[in-house]
Amino acid sequence: MNRFSNWMVLAAATLAPAASYAQISCTREGLRAATDLYIAAQTKGDISGLPLAKGLGYVENFKLMNIDDGLIKKPMKIDHQRSLLDTTTCQTYTEVIVTDKAAPYALGTRLRVDHGLIAEIEMLWTTTGYWLFNIDNYLQASSTEDWGPILPTKHDTYATLVSAANAYLDAFLEGKKDLVPWGNPCKRTEGGTPIPGDSCDAGVPSGVNIANRHFVVDETIGSVAAFCTFGAGSPAGGGSGAADIHLFRVESGKLRYVHTMTHLLQANGPGRGQAKGGPNQGKGATPGNQK
């Protein structure tokens, strides 16, 4: 092999990582590439393959932290995952289910892409001992529900999807359940525990301010993920202020599926027979790293 050939091989090896990073963009294909890299990183517990921007923001359960101390560094065997791709805001949301008996997890992870690099990673996680956590039921529900693409002629608009999510979350403060676009049937899974029946409106209390909302929206699959806090963390706001994600599937403007995960220890939750956010709601948990 001559010197020119050697140089070409070395150049190709040097440029390979950059080429893989270049595929990340705000298109559906580019955002899918970002989620694929995230899943690979979470599986290995190794973030070296992620194209991270300088000044990366890493958040777990609404707390800013060093990524090197994050759950993203824990290797996991992922049993099920689905992603929302938001080309309007250049974000993704990935729901991850890990059924490992020794360390089961439900994760919700948001990425924000900026000029081909991942600028933000936000994760919320729950595990054994957290609010209504049942990972086997979560896997059963999530893997059998239809979250597939919706015909383009039947896509709800970005605004419609956000409005449906807001109407559901707003009902917790004022009890205005009649303003929520309930579908029939509608299946709700909370912490992995399915709510019986074909309605999603059971156990929606009033007096709880679902605060600090930010959304990831995917019109192609009619879905919206809402990161929020269950209450404003003060007596006036109701609830505990616990970190929470509500994931919605909307079909023809109506709620079809609702998934929730809440970073709140069961022991700090409401009393028996009360909905989350009821008058005996605890202050929420800030446990140590569970890696």
Image (cartoon, helix red, strand yellow):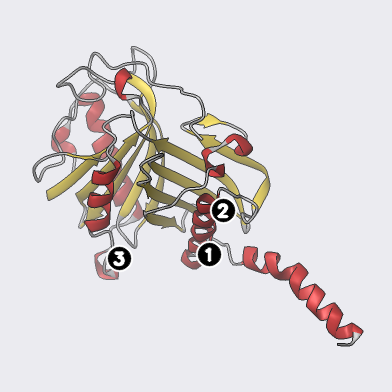
Taking 165 as reference, is 156 above or below it? Answer: below
Query: In the picture, which quadrant includes the N terminus?
Result: bottom right
Mark 3: which amino acid?
Pro
Q: Earlier in the sequence, mark 3 or mark 2?
A: 2
Frontmost residue, 170 versus 61: 61
In contact (CB < 8 Å): disc 3 and disc 2:
no
Q: Is residue 42 left or right of residue 191?
A: right
Label 3: how many residues lie within 10 Å, few (<14), some (14-19) or many (20+)?
few
> Residue 2: image x %, image y %?
89, 87
- State whether residue 233 appears in this view: yes
Which residue is drawn at the image coordinates 67% and 69% (left, top)?
A: 19
Marks 3 and 2, how far apart at CA: 23 Å
x 26%, y 22%: residue: 277
Q: Secondary structure at mark 1?
A: helix
Dot 1 corresponds to which residue? 30
Between 179 and 48, the one lying in front of the other is 48
Is mark 1 in CB contact (under 8 Å) with mark 2?
yes
Residue 191: percent from the left, percent from the top? 28, 37
Q: Which residue is mark 3?
A: 149
Residue position for label 2? 113
Would you call the spot at circle 2 few (<14 residues within 10 Å), some (14-19), or many (20 or more)? many
Q: Amino acid at mark 2?
A: Val
Q: CA distance from mark 1 to mark 2?
A: 9 Å
Which image quarter: residue 251? bottom left
Query: 77 above or below 200?
Result: below
